[in-house]
Amino acid sequence: MRREAGHVFIANAIWTLGLPRLPPFATEQRPPSATDLEAVPEAIQSVLEWLDRIASALLNHHTAKEYEEALRKSGVAHGETGLFATEQKTRAAIRNARFDMRIATELATKL
């Protein structure tokens, strides 16, 4: 779905908001009629309102505390962390503990 929508956020927004409601238009089996042409302004308005809801959802997402925190932690440049010193120490301690557990498990299976 993400590939079809073009971006993961659009895919999530479609999942949450749904697609805009459009009236049935002419198909190969049914030629266009006058009512099809009259429905075009309503369809355009429906799509514009849907895009406005998407934009509002994106803006709300970007102003959420969780998003701002994730953005801070991701850093501003490649190879640079945005973590505070205590967060870096905690992450390193967890990584070392997991490594030690893996080594201990491997040694235990060898005995």
Image (cartoon, rainbow, N blue to C red):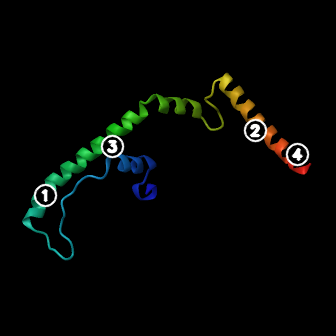
Q: Residue at x 41, y 59 (%)?
A: 4
Q: Residue at x 29, y 41 (%)?
A: 53
Going from the N terminus, do you reach mark 3 or mark 1 first? 1
**Cα distance, mark 3 to mark 1?**
23 Å
Going from the N terminus, do you reach mark 1 or mark 2 first? 1
Q: Which mark is residue 54?
A: 3
Report the residue marked by disc 1.
39
* Disc 4 packing (10 Å; few <14; some 14–19; many ≥20): few
Task: Give the left or right position of residue 105, taking residue 85 as reference.
Answer: right
**Amino acid at the residue labelled 4:** Leu
Q: Which mark is residue 98?
A: 2
Q: Residue at x 18, y 65 (%)?
A: 25
Q: Nearer the viewer, mark 4 or mark 3?
A: 4
User: Tag 4, which secondary structure?
Assistant: helix
Q: Nearer the viewer, mark 2 or mark 4?
A: 4
Report the residue marked by disc 4.
107
Q: Residue at x 90, y 50 (%)?
A: 110
